[in-house]
Image (cartoon, rainbow, N blue to C red):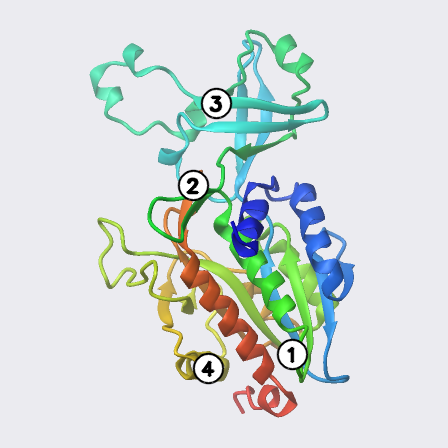
């Protein structure tokens, strides 16, 4: 396992659902501390400042550290736990999955359950079970046993999903690729930018609470006050059954992607073209996509102050917002190369030229 694989394993296996990012935040602080001056906002985002050209443009690289998960809402007298989602979950991927409840006494393993199909009439067995009818079972038989284990309302619940190197070469399966992949790109791009001339000041930012409303992006951008921003994300791979090319033509193993549109942001057109031109110069295949539902931290960052030229560069990923997503290492490596090259081009004249006027 090389350094990049180890980094992705470390970040994806760390716990850190929206609002409860403490464990992964400490890992990212440790990774970023040798690379620049650390600071933060007041909601938990980590900011690393790398000084290049004094007085140069302020370039923000942002990936969100939070993963989707759940919160304990209520413990019933029979000892089952009712929960609410932190981030966007599709009910169909929940049932039968293992989870970890993070309690004041330690981690408690559980499984998401519902009424057994053996006890349902035939017409109900054909229906999708709604999340409201599910619960978390930690093996208890009473509310007292749950309380004795340390579980109480407000505790975060994390999906269980180990990092796995798959049989297909350089293909990884893990939870939380959305968006620990983006955080890893921030870290490795900042490492690469340590050497050589840097015509700007770079801020590598790992934001919190993106999955519940771009909250860390909204606050960290106030600290950074960027002149230009690159958002590092995952993109929805369309190379699975049932997805038409016009819905998504993004495929694993065919290079990083760039969002031409999402529900919260249209990228700065000149910055978009700079990314495309840079990819062509480097021989990096660059895929494009349009996300009609959902958004990224760019939705908050590009509207800061009078506006920030912003673009999203992403790593194609299958099965996001589930207990296990799949990515290809080559797409990730090319994304890091592309981000480094674009940042090195962002001198004062180039950034000034991104204005639409």
- Nearer the observer: mark 3 or 4; the answer is 4
> With respect to residue 215, does 274 lie above or below?
below
Q: Which is closer to the viewer, label 4 or label 1? A: 4
x then y, percent, for residue 189 = 59, 68
Seen from the viewer's position, the closer of residues 252 and 217 is 252
Alpha-carbon distance for marks 3 and 2?
16 Å
Q: Which of marks 3 and 4 is nearer the N terminus?
A: 3
**Residue at left 72%, top 65%?**
35
Question: Which tag, 2 or 1, sits closer to the chain's start?
Answer: 1
The residue lying toward the viewer, choosing from 346 and 13, is 13
Q: In this view, does 286 lie to the left or right of 57?
A: left
Report the Cα–Cα distance between label 2 and label 1.
36 Å
- Name the residue beneath numbered marker 2: 324
The answer to the question of whether label 2 and label 4 lie on touching residues, with beta carbons closer than 8 A, is no
Categorize mark 1 by other alpha carbons within 10 Å: few (<14), some (14-19), many (20+): many
Say what secondary structure mark 4 lies in.
helix
Q: Which residue is drawn at 65% across and 89% down?
A: 348
Q: In this view, does 22 lie to the left or right of 10?
A: right
């Amino acid at each position: 396992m090389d350094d990049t694989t180890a980094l992705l394993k470390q970040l994806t296996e760390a716990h850190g659902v929206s609002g409860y990012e403490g464990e992964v935040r400490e890992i990212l602080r440790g990774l970023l501390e040798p690379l620049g001056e650390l600071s933060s906002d007041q909601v938990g985002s980590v900011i690393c400042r790398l000084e290049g050209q004094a007085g140069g443009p302020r370039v923000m690289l942002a990936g969100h550290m939070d993963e989707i998960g759940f919160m304990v809402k209520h413990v019933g007298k029979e000892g089952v736990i009712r929960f609410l989602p932190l981030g966007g979950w599709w009910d169909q991927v929940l049932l039968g999955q293992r989870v970890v409840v993070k309690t004041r006494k330690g981690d408690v393993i559980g499984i998401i359950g519902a009424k057994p199909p053996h006890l349902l009439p035939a017409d109900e067995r054909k229906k999708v079970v709604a999340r409201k009818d599910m619960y978390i079972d930690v093996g208890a038989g009473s509310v007292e046993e749950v309380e004795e284990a340390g579980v109480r309302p407000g505790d975060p619940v994390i999906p269980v999903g180990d990092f796995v190197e798959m049989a297909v070469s350089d293909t990884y399966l893990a939870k939380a690729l959305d968006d620990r992949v983006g955080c890893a790109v921030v870290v490795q791009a900042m490492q690469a930018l340590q050497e050589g001339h840097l015509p700007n000041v770079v801020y590598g930012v790992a934001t919190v609470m993106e999955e519940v409303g771009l909250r860390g992006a909204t606050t960290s951008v106030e600290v950074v006050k960027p002149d230009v921003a690159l958002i590092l994300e995952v993109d929805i791979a369309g190379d699975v059954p049932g997805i038409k090319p016009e819905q998504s033509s993004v495929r694993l193993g065919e290079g990083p992607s760039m969002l031409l549109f999402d529900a919260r942001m249209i990228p700065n057109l000149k910055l978009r073209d700079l990314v495309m031109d840079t990819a062509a110069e480097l021989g990096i295949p660059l895929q494009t996509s349009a996300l009609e539902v959902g958004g990224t931290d760019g939705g908050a960052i590009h509207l800061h102050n009078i506006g920030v030229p912003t673009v999203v560069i992403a790593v194609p990923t299958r099965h996001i917002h589930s207990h296990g997503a799949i990515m290809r290492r080559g797409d990730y490596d090319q994304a890091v190369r592309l981000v480094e090259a674009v940042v090195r081009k962002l001198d004062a004249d180039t950034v000034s030229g991104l204005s639409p006027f």
